[in-house]
Image (cartoon, helix red, strand yellow):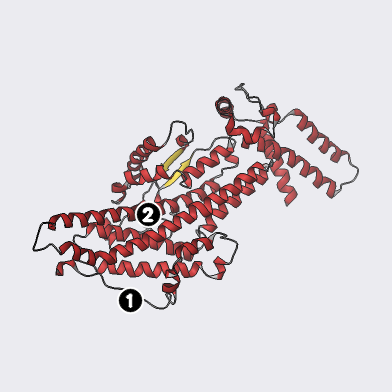
């Protein structure tokens, strides 16, 4: 089976090298002009391939340049020796196939990594799909915040999102970013069915989600947002649809997490604004001068819950972006620098994506469902706080608080189990747990959480004042 795969790969690689795309010839010439303006971008690669030290200016890129005739002669000699052998020797045949595969893989590596700027595209996918351009997505979420408070319109949701997406790009993306034009924001063409109003969603009624949405539990109708990346020849050999779908899965998860964090921050600002408004109303009122202080005492439980939510989401974001994505990115970069084989590179990239998914717990159903529930509860809390005047009805907040405490403690209990914390699938998980439990709070509250529903202090009713 291995030999058959090697034969198939060698034949496909040589055909690609011998028949370069016409569009790639023009792109290649443009990339060489950029290499003249910024040679430092390919400094790590040209040293290993002397023929690339001088920039190429010919826009006509032929198969002879990508796969020299001398290499083809070597392959022909190997095949002729096999043909002229009086007896078939399995070992000789396998050695010849491996040699041909190595030649083809080396030249395909040069084409994809050096000429097609693979590392630049990998960096672009990290910037946009893995939210490395945090300022851009923070700006996008703020620009689209009011829009995302309403259910998406089935026919115009994607067009509606393009306005804040382009505004965010104008504010944060420089003209030198040549990869932004390849990124497109998408929504499922059929939309996500919305069976109730946003008010109903705040009350905990979940909308039905289509099967292609990455999470099993929909936060709201905007969960379907995903990115599309335009891939040219020959990078489609590397960035297959399967690979891009994995990037989309991580992107949807990270965007929901970032949106949740932003809403929690906005909620705190809204609560403080309400507090200052109440204080200014009664600052000169001798009769009700103590009203603001009493109100603060009544709202302290809500403030505390919001802080617990923000603490968990902040640490989860830091864990994924720094401990998982950045560390795996550095591993991938080191492997690219030390490799000159295309098939090795594909394997390294697959391991990179698998590590991102597994270390972010996206492949563990129980954990991903809890995380989705936590994000949903955080959004419900934020919307409830900002839409309830005077907190006259606190039953919903009490329910959200109780559910959040149960889910967060369940999450900690699962993550600290020996099955996860003691395994190699998440080498930095212990750091995340240490940040969560730095004062032993989670450890103390998580005991027996799966079997015991703890009582929580009720949020008092303000209209009794």
Q: Quadrant of residue 388?
A: bottom left
Image location of residue 170, percent across then percent down: 37, 35
Image location of residue 161, percent across then percent down: 35, 43
184 shown above or below 202: above
Q: Is residue 454 left or right of residue 383?
A: right
| Residue under the image location 34 percent in, 41 percent down | 164
Can residue 454 be seen in the rendering of this structure? yes
Residue 373 or residue 283, whichever sits in front: 283
Mark closer to the chain start, 2 or 1: 2
Image location of residue 208, percent across then percent down: 36, 59
User: For mark 1, does the 10 Å Cα neighbourhood hold few (<14), some (14 to 19), or many (20 or more) residues?
Assistant: few
Q: Is residue 247 left or right of residue 45?
A: left
Q: Secondary structure at mark 2?
A: helix
Query: Disc 2 and disc 1: Cα gap in Å?
Result: 27 Å
- Contact (Cβ within 8 Å) of mark 2 with mark 1: no
- State the mark number for residue 455: 1
Q: Is residue 353 left or right of residue 272?
A: right
Name the residue beneath numbered marker 2: 261
Q: Is residue 129 left or right of residue 73?
A: left
């Amino acid at each position: 089976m291995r030999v058959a795969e090697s034969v198939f790969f060698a034949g496909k690689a040589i055909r690609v090298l011998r028949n370069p795309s016409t569009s790639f010839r023009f792109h290649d010439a443009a990339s060489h002009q950029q290499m003249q303006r910024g040679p430092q971008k390919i400094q790590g690669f040209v040293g290993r391939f002397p023929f690339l030290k001088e920039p190429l200016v010919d826009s006509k890129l032929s198969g002879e340049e990508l796969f020299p005739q001398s290499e083809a002669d070597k392959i022909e000699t190997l095949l002729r020796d096999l043909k002229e052998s009086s007896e078939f020797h399995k070992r000789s045949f396998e050695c010849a196939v491996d040699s041909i595969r190595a030649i083809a893989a080396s030249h395909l590596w040069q084409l994809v990594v050096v000429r097609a700027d693979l590392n630049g595209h990998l960096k672009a996918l990290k910037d946009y799909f893995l939210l490395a351009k945090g300022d851009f997505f923070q700006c996008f979420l703020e620009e689209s915040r009011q829009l995302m408070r309403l259910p998406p319109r089935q026919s115009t949701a994607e067009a509606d999102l393009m306005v804040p997406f382009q505004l965010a790009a104008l504010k944060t993306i420089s003209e030198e970013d040549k990869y932004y034009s390849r990124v497109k924001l998408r929504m499922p063409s059929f939309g996500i069915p919305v069976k109730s109003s946003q008010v109903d969603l705040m009350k905990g009624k979940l909308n039905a989600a289509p099967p292609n949405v990455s999470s099993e539990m929909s936060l709201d109708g905007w969960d379907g947002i995903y990115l599309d990346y335009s891939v040219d020849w020959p990078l489609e050999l590397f960035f297959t649809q399967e690979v891009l779908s994995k990037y989309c899965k991580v992107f949807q998860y990270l965007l929901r997490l970032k949106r949740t964090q932003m809403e929690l921050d906005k909620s705190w600002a809204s609560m403080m604004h309400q507090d200052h408004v109440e204080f200014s109303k009664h600052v000169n009122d001798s009769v009700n001068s103590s009203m603001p202080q009493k109100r603060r005492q009544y709202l302290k439980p809500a403030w505390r819950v919001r802080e617990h939510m923000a603490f968990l989401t902040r640490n989860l974001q830091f864990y994924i972006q720094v401990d998982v994505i950045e560390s795996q990115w550095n591993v991938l970069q080191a492997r690219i620098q030390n490799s000159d084989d295309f098939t090795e590179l594909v394997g390294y990239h697959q391991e990179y994506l698998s590590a991102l998914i597994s270390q972010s717990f996206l492949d563990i159903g129980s954990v991903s469902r809890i995380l989705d529930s936590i994000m949903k509860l955080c959004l419900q809390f934020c919307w409830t706080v900002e839409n309830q005047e005077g907190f006259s009805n606190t039953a919903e907040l009490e329910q959200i608080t109780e559910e959040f405490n149960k889910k967060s403690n369940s999450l900690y209990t699962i993550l600290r189990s020996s099955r996860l914390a003691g395994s190699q699938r998440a080498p930095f998980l212990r750091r995340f747990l240490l940040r969560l439990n730095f004062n032993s709070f989670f450890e103390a509250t998580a005991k027996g959480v799966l079997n015991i529903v703890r009582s929580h202090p009720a949020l008092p009713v303000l209209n009794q004042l």
